[in-house]
Each structure stands twice: as C-alpha cells, then as structure tokens.
Image: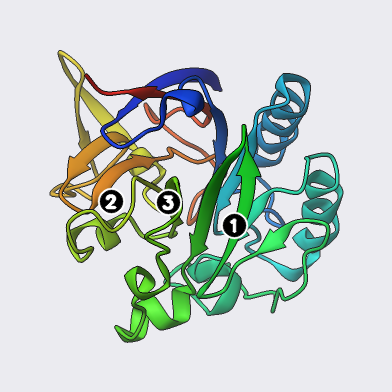
Amino acid sequence: MRLRTLDVPLARLPEDLAGLRIAHLSDFHLGLPSRGEVAVERAVEWVAERKPDLVAITGDLVSRPRGERLLREQLARLDRPFVVLGNHDVEHSRDPFSRAAGLTDLSPARLLVDESETVELRGHRVQVVGVDPRAYRRGSSRPWELADESADLRILLCHFPYVLSFLPPGAFDLVLSGHMHDGQIALPLGRDRKFRFAHPNVRFATGLYERPGGTMHVSPGLGTTFVPFRIFARPEATELVLQQRH
C-alpha cells in the first residue's frame, strides 16, 4: 500500500493555517476476507504516529456487520476522527457479499449525518460538514445549506465524489470523498493513464480536482468490494498538507 503526503493549495486559506495536516482515509470495507484489513491497520497506525491536526474518514467502513468490532478498535486509535458513512454502511449495495451494519454512534469518533461541527485549530474556526449517503442517493442532501460563511475554513465530507458537481461556487474550501477505489481493477496505459474496468468513464477517480464548489481529494481507499483484491489500484492512506494558493 501507499502512505502518501500531498500538498493541497487552497485559495481562501488563512496564513496561519498553511501547513495544516489532514489525514484522509476511506473505504475500509471491514468484515469480508481481504488484504484490505491489513491495509486499514497499517494506515491507522501511520496516521496515529504522525498525529495530524485533523482526521477524516469518508465512508464504506464495513461490508459485513462482523467488521464493526475491528472498526471500533481502529477508530479508538485515532484522535477523535470525523467520519461519514458510505452506501455499504447503510444499504445493500450491488456487491452480493455485502450487508449493511446499521452503524449509528461511533464514539469517540464524530459521526456526521447531514450535520456539521466546528473546531478551533491554530486559533481559527474550521467547520466540517458530513453528508448522509441515504439523503445523497435520494437527491435530498443540500450540504451547502449547512455551510457557515463565518468559518475560516470549510470542509465537506461526502462518500460520493460527484457531490462536487452540485456544489454552489465557493461553498466549501475542501471536499473529501472516496467510493471509487481508483477503479480497484485497472489496466495501465502508460504516462499515468489507466483503464478502470468498473468505471471506464469516471470523472473523479482519485487525487485532486478543482471546481467552483471547492477543491476535492478523492481517496483511493484501503479495502475492496466484489473481489478481495486490487490490480494496479494501490490502497492508500493520504496526509493532505494545506497550502496557500498564490
């Protein structure tokens, strides 16, 4: 797996928040036989050692109810991470082996279900908004209505990266998503290009994207679905280092 540090330039970032470190993890899919469990444990250990300013986990935490015990063990190793759910956490997906676990309270982690929380970092107000995947699927989620214009930094957590296409301009500074697994099974085409069999025409696959609604990071995730392996789509834990865009 890859343990990656990535600079993220933001246009509206206060000078005091330059260098702020955010760990972004996603798509654990715990509960099914997979090397993803090893990747999750290694990723959590790396994040715990680095002690970032904020930890965000963007959904698909478990693929079977039996994965909940390990999930809670791993969350307890992190410093009160912000968490949102994914489609595998709340409903039966297209994966015939997946079963929803009915996750609710994940304390000491802060689970955000179409709600927000504001914390103070380096003397500045940082708002984190989390999207409920059920509301997103119904088309009723409007996270921009929760955005606090007085916050110095606004961060949106949504399992589905296509949320970026619906955000009003300037709604959020940073959007964190997962879901795509970088295709999970891919064929390299050279020069950093690849064919993703599950999502051949995907608009947001992995990495950084800039749109009027914000700058988004899509995590490649750590686990697997449908089949218990990845091909040319390495699992990744990412530390985002915020920088001022000049």
Residue located at (49% from left, 28% from top) = 17
Residue located at (16% from left, 48% from top) = 203
Q: Earlier in the sequence, mark 3 or mark 1?
A: 1
Query: Can you say whether 193 is above or below 218 in the image?
Result: above
Residue located at (75% from left, 34% from top) = 41
> Residue 156 is drawn in which quadrant?
bottom left
Element under disc 3: strand
Q: Earlier in the sequence, mark 2 or mark 3?
A: 3
Indicate the amino acid at tag 2. Ala
Q: Find the distance from the CA under tag 2 to the CA under tag 3.
A: 32 Å
> Residue 60 is drawn in which quadrant?
bottom right
Residue beneath label 3, please?
A: 154
Residue beneath label 2, please?
A: 198
Image quadrant holding the N terminus, namely top right
Q: Find the distance from the CA under tag 3 to the CA under tag 1.
A: 9 Å
Residue located at (44% from left, 45% from top) = 153
